[in-house]
Image: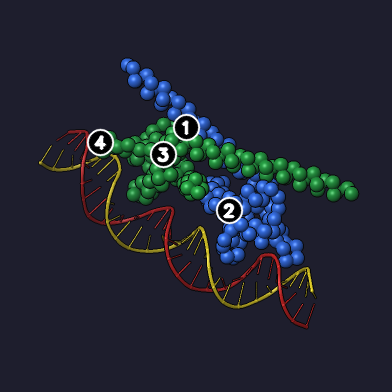
Chain colours: A blue, B green, C red, D yellow
Amino acid sequence: MAAVAEVDRVFRALSDPTRRGVLERLSRGPASVTELARPFRMALPSFTEHLAVLEECRLVRSSKKGRVRTYRLAPGPLRAAEHWLARQRDLWDRRLDQLDRYLARMKKEERP
Amino acid sequence: MAAVAEVDRVFRALSDPTRRGVLERLSRGPASVTELARPFRMALPSFTEHLAVLEECRLVRSSKKGRVRTYRLAPGPLRAAEHWLARQRDLWDRRLDQLDRYLARMKKEERP
DNA sequence: ATAATACTAAGGTCAATACCTAAGTATCTG
DNA sequence: CAGATACTTAGGTATTGACCTTAGTATTAT
């Protein structure tokens, strides 16, 4: 049940293009807040809220050294992410199967 | 850009457990509104709103015959869904690579 | 020491979400 | 045709989300 809420939050986090953009940037390596914010036309406090969302569902981690906070992708929830990814893949696969069956049925009914 | 909003909406749709539940149920075959609603303790109008969300981002399709509306998974946006799925997989893979490199670096620094 | 940099905190607006109840409208069933 | 069934419509509330500005604090550079 906590797992359900976790999945909720991960999907929710991924539903925003700014946050997806951050994840993509971070997949090329760690970066500071300012660096991450640069591509987005948004007040910094608004932007850091996005970072907080990503960190709350543990898709990223951060640490501060001096005045610079550095963000990186989090290794921890990888398993969780991969878990839902796998489940989703299953879902789409089943869906595809169902479509196949449906199309087959249609074909049959086409020439009775 | 429309594609971005589309991905937004799909992730948003998937961020609700009721809606994911509906998708999973539908992956086992079509079903009526009442049938889909049964497992959820929720007023019907609230529930049908979830169905509307799923239909708006075209994850499902519906048709009405008599007084019964039947929902099924939509074949149409499969390509879009698979597209983001693939991109996501890429993302996690790159992330995993990055983690590998990071761990390798840590190991090196451990014994200088 | 002063100024610039890199965030961080506080609080405010506005729209969208996720629920609800109550009251429809069709369609079937007896 | 009367009542049950299967949604639909309308409208209301409460929370959350995504922005904003303004004003901090802590660090580094000159």
**In what element is the residue under mark 2?**
helix
Front residue (pair A78, B6): B6
Residue receiving disc 3: B60
Residue receiving disc 4: B66
Residues tagged by mark 2 and mark 4 found on one chain of the structure: no
**How many numbered marks, from 0 up?**
4
Give the letter of the chain under mark 3. Answer: B
Which quadrant of the structure image shows residue B91?
top right
Marks 3 and 2: CB-CB under 8 Å?
no
Q: Of marks 2 and 1, which one's residue comes earlier in the chain?
A: 2
Where in the figure is residue C5, as x and y percent of width and height? Answer: 71, 68
Where in the figure is residue C4, as x and y percent of width and height? Answer: 71, 72
Numbered label attached to residue A19: 2
- For badge 4, the amino acid type reads Gly
Front residue (pair A23, C29): A23
Residues tagged by mark 1 and mark 3 found on one chain of the structure: no
